[in-house]
Image (spheres, rainbow, N blue to C red):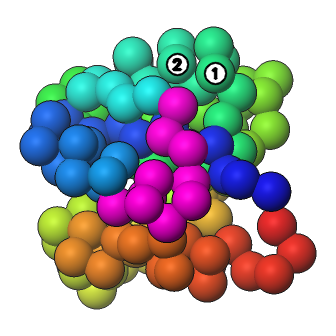
Amino acid sequence: MQRRILVIDDNTAFRGALRQVLETDGFTVVAGAATGAAGVRLAQEHEPDLVIVDVQLTDGDGFDIAERLAGLDVSFEVILTSSLDSSDLGALVTESSALGFIPKAELSAQAIEALLGPSR
């Protein structure tokens, strides 16, 4: 099954590059948002299988956005990402409703599939 992805990141160039990488590997990027608020709206509209959320957004942090996404009536997984290393984020990732964290430098279809596991 082809996964449908929404990317929430305030860096336009990163969203474009990630779209290209993921679509080359068989994913479908249904939308991209520069703000958390726009991302929440797009998640409701597009009902993706997966939402990738930057930890540092201009209108809030990705942890808060992950919680807002978890409260929607739409079912999908959330993966957090950042240019920061996971060790810089401490327990924030494990305490969040997100499935997990992948650093931007390591974000790929393979890393996503590994985090999602075989049953998802």
Where residue 76 appears, x then y in whole percent? 73, 44
* Residue kind at label 2, given as amino acid type: Leu
The image quarter in which residue 70 lies: top right
Which residue is tagged 2?
42
Say which residue appears at 36% left-offset and 37% top-offset. Answer: 8
In this rendering, position of residue 37 left or right of residue 95:
left
Let me know if residue 114 is in the magenta part. no
Residue 95 visible in the snapshot: no
Q: Is residue 66 above or below residue 31?
A: below
Does the residue at mark 2 contact the one at mark 1 (Cβ under 8 Å)? Answer: yes
Q: Is residue 30 above or below residue 46?
A: below
* Viewer-closest of 95 and 100: 100
Residue beneath disc 1? 46
Residue 45 visible in the displayed image: yes
Residue 103, x across and y down, in percent: 30, 74
Q: Quadrant location of the N terminus?
A: bottom right
Relative image position of residue 45 (x, y in whole percent): 63, 13
- Secondary structure under tag 1 reads helix
Q: Is residue 28 magenta?
A: yes
The residue under the point 34% across, 61% down is: 21
Residue span colored magenta: 21-30
